[in-house]
Image (cartoon, rainbow, N blue to C red):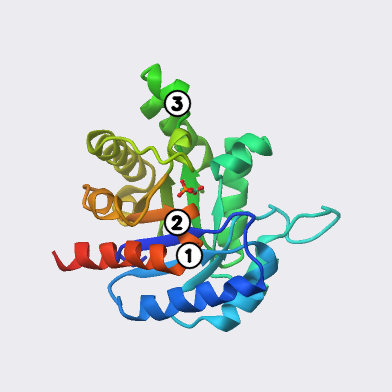
């Protein structure tokens, strides 16, 4: 996998065809920063249209089903995402884990189904505020990684991990530089334990209230290989500033 900083926007359940104008503007901005890899994960309804609207950036799903097809009303399979033009999918986002009761085992099955369908995977992990306050953040994330990382030959090549403290998502709060550094270091160590040398190539993204103001500081932390951005990815101007911060961290 590329070692360029990876800046990914997760539009969640937001976006209409009118918002493809934002995607086009983000695509034009990405062309100015060839040393940054940029992608958007719109709602499934927009994947085909976004894929056709952009040239420079990746387009992906926010989740996938573990089966390729069948009687699973409302779900979208990894095979379907690929067919729609997706390059990757997010799995294990904390909103899926919390609101849809997704277990580590299910997240792992989704990651493996996605990779089997030819998609790259961004696998999300992160602790709640109570878990951090009780000193368990690293143990919780280690458990999530152990249970949800895909296993098999060469799976590390198509993988990124997003560390997203649940309490930082959509709240405007971010962990200290020290805490981000410590967690990313712990994740790196575990990736190498599980995948061997290939684990050193997996990008570890930070996610949780990243915005134009704090991006440069967060992206400069050791082992932060990019950002998964929610709210600030919905408007091209703000997201472009984050891409620019990643581009500058590359030049520094
Ligand atoms: C997210 O949900 O993945 C996320 C990081 O959201 P936000 O940037 O809005 O905190």
Q: Name the residue under label 3.
A: 129
Q: Can residue 154 be seen in this view?
A: no
Real-space CA distance between mark 2 and mark 3, rounded to the nearest whole angstrom: 22 Å
Residue ID at (59%, 44%): 107
Q: Where residue 137 sits: x, y (%)?
A: 39, 27
Position of 103 with respect to 77 (left or right) is: left
Instruction: Characterize the local packing of mark 2: few (<14), some (14-19) or many (20 or more) Cα atoms within 10 angstroms.
Output: many
Q: Mark 2 points at which residue?
A: 232
Q: Are marks 3 and 1 in contact (CB under 8 Å)?
A: no
Foreground residue among 242 and 126: 242
2 or 3: tag closer to the N-terminus? 3
Q: Nearer the viewer, mark 2 or mark 3?
A: 2
Q: Do the residues labelled 2 and 1 touch (CB within 8 Å)?
A: yes
Q: Within 8 Å: ligand 1 and the Cβ of disc 1? A: no
Q: Name the residue under label 1.
A: 235
Secondary structure at numbered mark 3: helix
Q: Can residue 12 be seen in this view?
A: yes
Residue ID at (67%, 35%): 101
Q: Within 8 Å: ligand 1 and the Cβ of disc 2? A: yes
3 or 1: tag closer to the N-terminus? 3
Foreground residue among 137 and 133: 133
Residue ID at (52%, 36%): 147
Q: Within 8 Å: ligand 1 and the Cβ of disc 3? A: no
């Amino acid at each position: 996998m590329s070692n360029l900083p990876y800046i990914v926007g997760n539009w969640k359940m937001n976006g209409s065809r009118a918002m493809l104008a934002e995607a086009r503007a983000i695509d034009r901005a990405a062309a100015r920063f060839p040393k940054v890899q940029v992608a958007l994960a719109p709602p499934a309804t927009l994947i085909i249209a976004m894929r056709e609207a952009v040239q420079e950036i990746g387009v992906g799903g926010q989740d996938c089903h573990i089966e390729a097809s069948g009687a699973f009303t409302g779900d979208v399979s990894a095979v379907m995402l690929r067919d729609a033009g997706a390059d990757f999918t997010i799995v294990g986002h904390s909103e899926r884990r919390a609101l849809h009761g997704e277990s580590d085992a299910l997240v792992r099955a989704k990651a493996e189904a996605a990779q089997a369908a030819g998609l790259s995977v961004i696998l999300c992990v992160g602790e709640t505020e109570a878990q951090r306050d009780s000193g368990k953040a690293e143990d919780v994330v280690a458990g999530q990684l152990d249970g949800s990382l895909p296993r098999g030959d060469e799976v590390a090549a198509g993988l990124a991990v997003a560390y997203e403290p649940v309490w930082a998502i959509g709240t405007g709060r971010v962990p200290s530089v020290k805490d981000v550094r410590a967690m990313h270091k712990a994740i790196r160590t575990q990736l190498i334990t599980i995948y061997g040398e290939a684990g050193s190539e997996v990008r570890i993204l930070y996610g949780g209230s990243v915005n134009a103001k704090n991006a440069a500081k967060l992206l400069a932390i050791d082992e932060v290989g990019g950002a998964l951005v929610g709210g600030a990815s919905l408007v091209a101007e703000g997201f472009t500033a984050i891409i620019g911060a990643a581009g500058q961290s590359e030049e520094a």
